[in-house]
Amino acid sequence: MGQNAMRPELGVSVDKGALHVISLVSVGAHPTSGRPRRAEQDARAVELGLHLAGDNLHVLHAGDAEEPALRGYLGMGVDELHVLAQPPGADALPGLADYIRESGVQLVLTGSQAETGEGSGMLPYLLAEKLGWPLVVGLAEVESMSNGSVQVLQALPRGQRRRLKVRLPFLATVDNAAPKPRQSAYGPAQRGLLDVEEIEVVIDDVFIGAALTPAKPRPKRLKVIKAKSGADRMKAATAKASGGGGQVLKGVTPEEGAAAILKLLVEEGVVR
Amino acid sequence: MLNTLLPILLFAALGLAVLGALRRVSLWRNGRAAKVDLLGGLLAMPKRYMVDLHHVVARDKYIANTHVATAGGAVASIILAILVHGFGLHNRVLGYALLLMSAVMFVGAIFMYLRRRHPPSRLSKGPWMRLPKSLLAFSGSFFIVTLPVAGVLPANFGGWLLAIILGIGVLWGVCELFLGMTWGGPMKHAFAGALHLAWHRRPERFGGGRSTGLKPLDLTDRTAPLGVEKPKDFTWNQLLGFDACVQCGKCEAACPAFAAGQPLNPKKLIQDMVVGLAGGTDAHFAGSPYPSLDGQGKPVGEHGGNPHQPIVNGLVDADTLWSCTTCRACVEECPMMIEHVDAIVDMRRHLTLEKGATPNKGAEVLENLIATDNPGGFAPGGRMNWAADLNLDIMSHKKTVDVLFWVGDGAFDMRNQRTLRAFVKVLKAAKVDFAVLGLEERDSGDVARRLGDEATFQMLARRNIQTLAQYDFKRIVTCDPHSFHVLKNEYGAFEGRYVVQHHSTYLAELIVNGALNLGQHKGASVTYHDPCYLGRYNGEYQAPRDVLRALGIEVKEMERSGFRSRCCGGGGGAPITDIPGRQRIPDMRMDDIRETGAELVAVGCPQCTAMLEGVVEPRPMIKDIAELVADALLEDTAPAKPAAARREPAEAH
């Protein structure tokens, strides 16, 4: 793409406070112990929000206000955390959508995927659909803002960046390409306020009805390294995943096609 | 003429000195309240000064004798001079006494002066170079002025010229001694030092005691500041303690961070705190500056502050505070018994708890400690993996046991696991009734506390204490001096009081009791590295050496050993905050080790092991005392163990 080299000259022309931003946060889980904590990507959404809106950042959570891990976000220097009180298993979507619609917000930031609960990563998509807003996936940086539209960098795989111009309001997810969250400090975390709002609870029947089982690790595609030199390996590691290895089936019956796909899946070890 | 001039001079100077003292006291009172026994402290002060402080100063015989003469002479001369020349008690006996005392002071001041001819770099220059001359002027002038009183010379001898010279000499001396004492001259150390001894924040240190545990923050008091942001957030007796500094630079000479070129000089730090409490800039500091990476030292005069201004990034850079390894070498050396480490941790507390500004890996380590109870972020369920094949008893099953073996976070480190397994082998050989907490154990909180995260420390401490309260044990033994220190000295404030021993102490006990069948250490010559948290923090220098001697090892001592041992660089979270310097502390320590010519260094701490093994080879081998003992264990005779009997034929070809 070659666009990342052009980044610096644009500089930061974002006026803190001019933008009305909400960062959506959830309760995370530490990867090795599973204990509640501030979620890594949501913390990045708060960090980016603090960059953009400073003290005016609005941090919103739908769930249990009693969860101590929520204070981890307050510890980043946010004075107040808004909570839409919900029991576990309730659908966060309607409450969030109503709140955002009424708040007059221009930009909603959220992590890509929750660390607890369903963790489907669908919330940003469903929320954007419900609001009728554009969604930017993998927001890495907000470069500038003018006339109701924002120029942003979107993170793509392998460190690539795509420059986008998006009209406000919009919703954006952040992943590990966004700036690292600042340390959460104990003092502000304890002093921060929780503004709890009771909302109509919508039970997510699909979620409640389903049984959760631990995910099985996805089978890994075998990678045969054919490179002979270091330069080749570097190329293999950095090159864009390219097609070409595939096979185009044309004019075959659905049965033949399905058989070919199944054969490939068995070969790759996806189906055993 | 002098007879009218002297009383005026003396009393005017005294009056001004009292004013200065009141001003100084008001500066200290900017600090927060502290629980201090005001009267008891004052009464105990002379003994603290003559015994405890002298004990530290006497490590350097030259300066001890010189100081006794100068200070003793000065105190006596001042009192006598006020009586004789102030109140005009022209008594012959008093005259002779004043002659004698000013002579003693003069001789002391001469030796002071001689030492200052080629002062080592650790000594501050500036006004401190003037001080011996001022003392000479004071004692010399009073000696001559007193000669007529004693009847040695006639009154009015020498005429006007001498009278003027003597008048100037007295004025100079009186200004330095009386005014300098309370208005911020070098003699301030006498005034503030005496009161600092009286109202010290750790009175337990006097009379041969030891007090090294950090003081807890009251987290339930929402109005109390979390650590120290501004000079006024220190307690008043801490501010007083800073004022006691004599700028002798013993701390600077002992500080591993300073030697490594990291931006810390304990003496400068204390002087910066003095600047903070009095207001102003550090432009007048006349000692070694904070080191900088270019070797020039950070320029002096660019930092300043006052009691109501934040310290960090005004008076002191954060790097300076994070360079400290909390090794306590400065505190151990300080002849004024100033508590540098307390001050540094107080300021770190503010940075971590309020600002969220723990540098480098600090934030990650603290988050891990909260979420996984270990700094590495390892799955808590893996805490006992190192002992998967050892069949250790777990406290939750046994409930009652002689020895509770506190494993520590070294359980997650593959190098330290060798030490732990060696120690278990020894415990089993000695048939000790012991058990471990297993998955119930958590990090002791040492690193969190030194990084200023008092909240996480207290959380870990409370949970550990809760766990320990369920069980019945006679003592806790650990291979980690940091856990040892925290369990022994810092859990007490949270009602966790135990008999805690470092494994070297326990091994020495086992050996004395004949519980171990030991052979001799074979091969390599050995030196021993004292861990800070075992030695300076807990005074255990002898047991590790006794254990090594029992193995037939003649320890080749390093120059810096015992209470003067140099830190490995691994304490106080220093490897986590990782402030760059010109060289690494463990490399310097390895040079100390190499100087002895020893091929092996015995250690007693997982941090020291990790830091020293991080030094590039070729270098001496590093082995924990537990490993050395385990290696020297003589297996029981063949019939005792069928397993050993079965192995024999395989070995005998």
Image (tube, coloured by chain):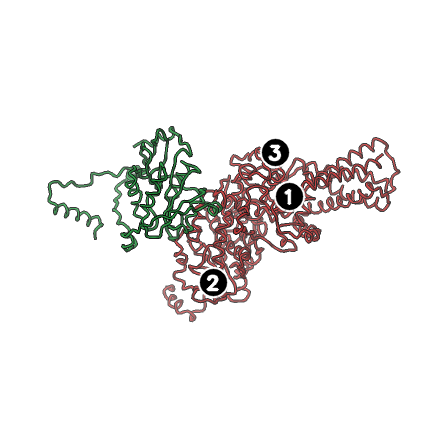
| Apparent side of residue B410 relative to residue A127 in the rendered image (left or right) | right
Report if residue B565 is visible in the image: yes
The disc numbered 1 marks a residue on which chain? Answer: B
Q: Which image quadrant for residue B384?
A: bottom left
The reply to the same-chain question for discs 1 and 2 is yes
Assess disc 1: are there few (<14), some (14-19) or many (≥20) residues with their C-alpha within 10 Å of its C-alpha: many
Q: Nearer the viewer, residue A77 or B418?
A: A77
Residue at mark 2: B426
Name the kind of residue labelled 2 in the image. Val
| Label 1 SS | helix
Is tag 3's residue or tag 1's residue first in the polypeptide sequence? 1
- The one of A73 and B193 positioned closer to us in this rendering: A73
Q: CA distance from mark 3 to mark 2?
A: 58 Å
| x, y percent for residue B190 | 69, 44
Q: Which residue is mark 3?
A: B283
Q: Which chain is green?
A: A
Of the two numbered discs 3 and 2 in the rendering, the one whose residue sits closer to the viewer: 3
Q: Secondary structure at mark 3?
A: helix
Q: Which chain is red?
A: B
